[in-house]
Image: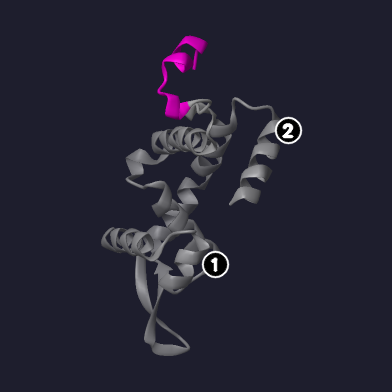
Amino acid sequence: MSGAARRKAPAALAGYALEDQIGFVLRKAQQRATAIFMRHFGRHRLTPTQWTTLVRIYEKGSLSQNHLGRLTAMDPATIQGVVQRLIERRLITRIADPDDRRRKRLGLTASGQRLVQRLIAKAFKVSSDTLRPLAWHEQKLVHDLLERLG
């Protein structure tokens, strides 16, 4: 914000610039990352949270919805909606838990497995495109610092 603009701000905002707040900067970075993700994944009708869910199940095998939510850093309402949409698309399915037939686990369908395998190269591209403005050592530093905050 320019000096003139700061002087015109209400007194209650004295010294406070939205552009300097970490939440605002993180949200802008997230918007950029999401836009890049959608450029690569949009035609596959996948959101970042759906992709995260598919990858976690691919990586870990069948999981309870509760465990999956924890592994994807999603609250119960969010993971429930994501799971329902992926079930409707026949990318994941509910299967009986081998240890307790009363419980259900979530697993990838054959279509879900093929989709993850087919799109993994695009996922690498999303990360490299998102971080492209930074030098390699800056990319690593940003990643490490954000991981510490998370």
Residue drawn at point x = 50 percent, y = 65 percent:
70
Q: Quadrant of residue 100?
A: bottom left
Q: Report the span colored magenta.
A: 1-13
Badge 1 element: helix
Q: Amino acid at mark 1?
A: Lys
Q: Position of residue 83 (x, y in %)?
A: 34, 63
7 vs 32, nearest the viewer: 7
Residue drawn at point x = 55 percent, y = 38 percent:
127
Mark 2 vs mark 1, CA separation in Å: 30 Å
* Neighbourhood count class around disc 1 (C-alpha, 10 Å): few under 14, some 14–19, many 20 upward: few
Q: What secondary structure is the stretch in magenta mostly built from?
A: helix
Q: Which residue, given by chain and number where applicable, does mark 1 sit on?
A: 60
Q: Quadrant of residue 87?
A: bottom left
72 vs 9, nearest the viewer: 9
Q: Quadrant of residue 93?
A: bottom left
* Magenta-colored stretch includes residue 6: yes
Q: Which mark is residue 114?
A: none
Quick check: 137 above or below 84?
above
Q: Position of residue 64 (x, y in %)?
A: 44, 74
Query: Counting residues from the N terminus, which is met first, the one under dot 2 or under dot 1?
Result: 1
Q: Which residue, given by chain and number where applicable, does mark 2 sit on?
A: 137
